[in-house]
Structure formats: structure tokens, C-alpha cells
Amino acid sequence: MPRYRFLRWLSGCDRTLPEEVMVRLSGGAIMHLPLLLAGMTCTLIAGVAMLIDAPSPFMLAWVTLILALMVGRVLEYRWRLKRAQRGQRTPVDGVLILALLWALSLGGLGAYALVAAPPALKLVAIGTLLVVSSSYPALCIGRPRLSVLLVLLADVPLKLAVPFQAESAYWIFVAQGPIYWLATLWFSCYLNGFAERALLGESRSRFQAEHDHLTGLHNRPGFYRRVDELRRSVAGVLPATLYYIDLDGFKQINDHQGHEAGDALLVDVAALLQQVLRQQDIVVRWGGDEFLLLLPGASEFLAADIAERLLTSVKALGMTYPGVGMSMGIAREADLRQLDAERLVKLIDRADAALYQAKRAGKGRYRHAC
């Protein structure tokens, strides 16, 4: 996502959409290096042809600018790739600025061609401008404001050059301008709306498939996917702590107060876990009255402190749910990056064994795995 306020507005970051949908909408074809380089190469070919046929300081400067933009795009891509490999945030401000400069340079080429180029080269330059600028809505799906601005930057300079021409026929370009701009706006908004609906539907389906319908926490498939994403994004050694939690007295609540009370207890416990834990921690309803917690980067001291806070917090639920408590087993993994599916299952088994020891010791406590 962009960092600067104007570029964030241009990318539509003020929309109230889920973060996953926003990130995917803010990607799009304009972030794809080969596509952008292909578009720049098409404009470069037209510019080189004009430079060879009618050399001028303007065309030499223009060709140099396009080459600089292409090199800058490659360097920017490599910079973002290295940051992503280190697990760092990768803002896209550079991509957007380079795209805006490219569109403005395209408009300058069209204006110069209209004023100073021979008829054949006018056709080449203006044709290239129209072909490339008409692709902006497709390149900027998810960013209709950016799409329209790119079209304006490429098209307005051509319109401004029309009064300097003797041929009155060129005023057709001016007359067509508002129609073309409004059509671009409509088409960009249409594509954006279609993409939003598709991604929102996909996001809802994935959420339902990977989250528990009662508590809203991750379920087993969601947990495995989330851990896999997390371990792939970690750049260096990062320990992880896993808690296997079982509610004490849950069966009695169900038997004496009914299943609705049992469901309400699970919802309250889920809310309690999310309140105690950090934003980066993963909370899972494993099944029934069992929960898993995964804490990336938690020290042994922090792991013990959180366990104590959880035991203390769940006691407050005893006013509403008499006899309820919590037991837990804790297991640690030295390097989160190594936590593939097989090692994750073994880590869960170790935490489960520690939970069994806590239960045997009298419930309402925690034990660390060996």
C-alpha cells in the first residue's frame, strides 16, 4: 500500500473494505513489471523513430527520460522484492510515481508531435498515445482514480497543443476529450466494482471456510494456512509458543444450564483470549471446548506471564458460569520458519501431552512440555 496521503487517496485506500481485499485491489496489472515495461517500450519505439527522423533536443531529452523511467522501474522492483524477502513492508509509492511520470511523458510526446512532427510521425505518436492510454483502465483495476488521472496526463497535453495548429480538423480532439474522459471514468468504475464484488465474495467464502462459525476464531484449516503464511514471511530466527487450552467444567455448564449457555461461554472465552493476546498472535477454536494459541516471538517469561493472566481472567467468568476454569499445556518451537505441517502437528501433540499433565495435577493450571 502507498505511504503518501495523495497516493493513498489515488489508490482508493479510503474505501471501507477488508484489508485482504484492499491489498489485492491495490495490486493489479500496473504492479506487474513486464506489462509496464512493455508499455514503456512501445512508447520508446515511437520516440526513437521520431528522434531518428527529426532529431531535436526535445526528443533526445524525451528518449532519455523514458529510458530513465524504465531503469527506475526495474530498480524499484528489485528494492521491493528484497524488502519482501526480509519480511518488511513494501510500499508502492515508487511504482505509482513512475507511472504518473510515464503518462505525463506520453502526453508531452503527443503534444510535441502535433506541433513539430511530420504528418507520418504525428500518426505514429498520436496512435501510440491513444493505444497506451486506452489500456490504463485495465492496468489500474481497483484504482479508478489513478486510471482517470493517467488518462488525463496523457491526453490533456495533446488537447492543449491543438490551438497552435493551422488545421481546424484537429479541434475534433478537443471535442472528443470530455466524452473520452467520462467513458474512461465509467469503465474504470465498472471494472473496479466488478473486481470488488468478486474479491469480497471470495473473501467471505474463504473466511467461512477457515473460521469457526460460532466464535469467529480460526478453525483448523485456517490455522494451518495462517501458520504457513507466517513462517514464510519471517526473515530470521523467531521462536514460537503454542498453548493447548481445555475448559474445565464445560460439560457441567452444558448439562445444567443448557447448550445455549455452553455456546455463550465459548463466545466469551474467545473474546477473553483475543483481549489478553497481542494482535500478531493466532487464536484457534480447535474443537469443542479446546483452543489453540500460537504466539510468535514470545519469550519464556512472556509465555508464563500470559498463561497466568489467562488463568486469572477466566476466573472472572465464574460469576456467570459457576465452576468454569481453564487448563493448558505449553510447547515451544525454537524457529518458526521450520514449523511446516509435520513439525506443527508434533508441536500440537507436545502441548496436548502437557495439557494432560496439567489436568492430572488438578486442573486450573498449566504445564510446559518437555
Image (cartoon, rainbow, N blue to C red):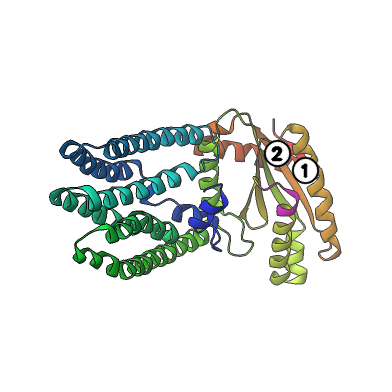
Secondary structure beneath label 1: helix
Q: Is 305 or 347 nearer to us in this picture? A: 305
Count of numbered circles on the image: 2
User: Residue flagged by tag 1: what amino acid is it?
Assistant: Ala
Q: Which residue is at a point 31% across and 39% down the rendered structure image?
A: 62
| Left or right for 189, reference 209 | left
| Left or right for 310, reference 287 | right
Q: Quadrant of residue 127?
A: bottom left
Q: Is 88 or 40 nearer to us in this picture? A: 40
Q: Is residue 45 visible?
A: yes
First-in-chain label (2 vs 1): 1
CA gap between label 2 and label 1 equals 9 Å
Q: Which residues are magenta?
A: 274-279
Residue assigned mark 2? 330
> In the rendering, which numbered label is found on residue 285?
none
Tell me, yes or no, whether the highlighted magenta stretch contains residue 276: yes
Q: Which residue is at a point 58% across and 64% down the rendered structure image?
A: 213
